[in-house]
Image (spheres, grey):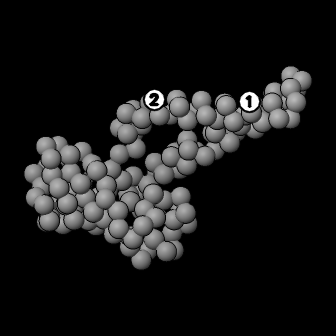
Amino acid sequence: MSDRIEHAGIVESVDGGVVRVQIERLSACAGCHAKSLCSIEKKRQVMTLRCDAPLKVGEAVKVVGESSLGMKAVVLAFAVPLALMVVAMFVAAKAGCGEVLAACVALLVTLLYYIVLFAFRSRLERVFSFRVESIN
């Protein structure tokens, strides 16, 4: 299995160091085991990426990312909040809270987790980044 995720695309706009690339989902996505978790649900999607390369509107490019980051993203987005929710519910139940209050505590802990993720989004964007490569 390749350690890169690649999608062909067309440059839609260039504004300073920010490039908008329209990518199309390939037929290979149909057989991908992670297709339900992938952000490319539509047939076409526009991605906004930072790029210093001199690109022109209409130019064919590749959007490249590291596949190893996919599992990290799944863990941060789904596994950690689920674990926090379950632990918070059991701790609240053991502390003598009722079922409804324990469920509310679990939801509050999950909400706080997503707020923290949102607060650190700029750091996460640096870790989970795609780059644009020219197809020349």
Residue 93 percent across, percent down from the top left: 86, 29
For the C terminus, which image quadrant? bottom left
In screen coordinates, is 84 left or right of 8?
Answer: right
Local SS, label 1? helix
Displayed quadrant of residue 106: top right
Q: Amino acid at mark 1?
A: Val
Q: Amino acid at mark 2?
A: Ala
User: Which of labels 1 and 2 is toward the front?
Assistant: 1
Q: Along the polypeptide, which appears first: circle 1 or circle 2? A: 1
Q: Is residue 51 in sight in this rendering?
A: yes
- Identify residue for label 1: 105
In screen coordinates, is 36 left or right of 125?
Answer: right
Q: Is residue 38 above or below residue 44?
A: above
- Seen from the viewer's position, the closer of residues 27 and 2 is 27
Q: Is residue 52 in sight in this rendering?
A: no
Q: Is residue 37 above or below residue 88?
A: below
- Identify residue for label 2: 119
Q: Residue at x 68, y 42 (%)?
A: 82
The image's mark for residue 19 is none
- Number of disc labels: 2
Local SS, label 2? helix
In screen coordinates, is 135 left or right of 42?
Answer: left
Separation of marks 1 and 2 at Cα, in angstroms: 21 Å
User: Disc 1 vs disc 2: Cβ atoms closer than 8 Å?
Assistant: no
